[in-house]
Amino acid sequence: MVNETTFESIKIRSLILWIVVFFIIMCLFYLITRNLLVDAEWDVIVGFLFYIVLGWWIIRNFNRVHLNYEKFLGHVPPNYNWLFLFTIIIAVIILSLGLGELSRYIISTIDPNLLNQLPSTSVFYTPEETPLAPFLNFMDFIIAVIMAPIVEELLFRGIILHRFTIKWGVKWAILGSSIIFGFLHTDIVGAFIFAVVMCILYIKTASIFVPILAHMINNMLAYLMQILSTFSPDSTVASHSLGVAVLLLMISIVVIAYFLYKNWPQRYWRPPYFQEVYDGIPENLYYE
């Protein structure tokens, strides 16, 4: 396998140490400034700085190992079926909605009163919380829709996928990196499925731009749905129909299962940085 040494020298455990140190510093800073900043301001500051630190760690390591950026990033595939991309993203979002509906139904069967205690899904900060509400809402959007997709794709589909492939092969690398991604999100199952789809898109197209764009679209749509729920929070929280949950899950599972069946990695597939290029075509596509 080519170019393995590039990713072998990028140690994930060093990232874990960086994250631990980051949160220790943030906790100390919070203790010092807790009377100066409200929770809303802190949420945005920590989120913004967190992705800055992750991004800096990624770029620092890329430069240290002299990464071939052109090979790693790839190019947007010509004549790519963007409708297909949009369809699979919608399917993943429908899956998350179905899982949410099902979880609320299960909660309602245990104790209907628990539904009224669920936290609000509003993504907006209000002037009552902070006078900086408009600016914080704007920054929250930038973090969720732009910063998070770029940094998370470079980390999970870029670094971790390649690192795990060296150890366990591409199929287990997809599953392993996706499990970690899932457990770092509140919607574990939906995030896991989403991560698997992003891995396949990256490997199949040999372009990190495709999963980054897909991730941005996914977060944008999720953000818009939370905005809509802000205007009718009661109906959103109270919704717990088993029929709706089953319908959403059936539709999404059929589409996602078909996608995975048609695109699950073949034995010869490799992550983009390990692929050879023949006549300008990445080998994963060249042999199809």
Image (spheres, grey):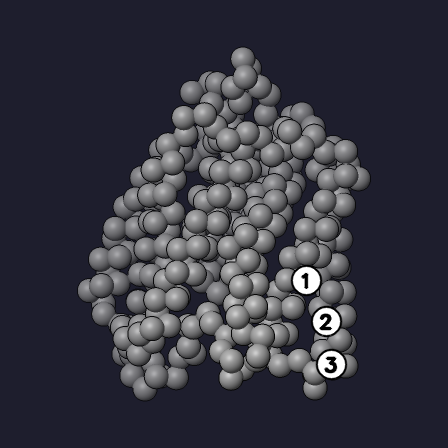
Q: Within 10 angstroms of label 2, few (less than 14), some, or many (20 or more) residues?
A: some
Q: Distance of mark 2 from mark 1, alpha carbons?
A: 10 Å
Find numbered disc 1 in the image and state the secondary structure of the residue it sits on.
helix
Front residue of 186/234: it is 234
**What's under tag 1, amino acid-wise?**
Leu
Q: Nearer the N terminus, badge 2 or badge 1?
A: 2
Q: Distance of mark 3 from mark 2, alpha carbons?
A: 10 Å
Left or right position of 179 against 11: left
Front residue of 127/171: it is 127
- Quadrant of image for the C terminus: top left
Q: Position of residue 148 (x, y in %)?
A: 56, 54
Find numbered disc 2 in the image and state the secondary structure of the residue it sits on.
helix
Q: Residue at x 54, y 82 (%)?
A: 129
Q: Using the image, determine if residue 96 lies above or below residue 256.
A: below
**What's under tag 2, amino acid-wise?**
Met
Q: Indicate which disc residue 33 carries.
A: 3
Q: Using the image, determine if residue 197 lies above or below residue 128.
A: above
Does residue 58 appear in this view? yes
Q: Residue at x 65, y 68 (%)?
A: 45
Q: Nearer the N terminus, badge 3 or badge 1?
A: 3
**In the rendered image, which residue does mark 2 sit on?**
26
Count of marks, rendered view: 3
Between marks 3 and 2 in the image, the one whose residue lies nearer the viewer: 3
Q: Using the image, determine if residue 250 lies above or below residue 263.
A: below
Between marks 2 and 1 in the image, the one whose residue lies nearer the viewer: 1
Q: Within 10 angstroms of label 1, few (less than 14), some, or many (20 or more) residues?
A: some
**In the rendered image, which residue does mark 1 sit on?**
49
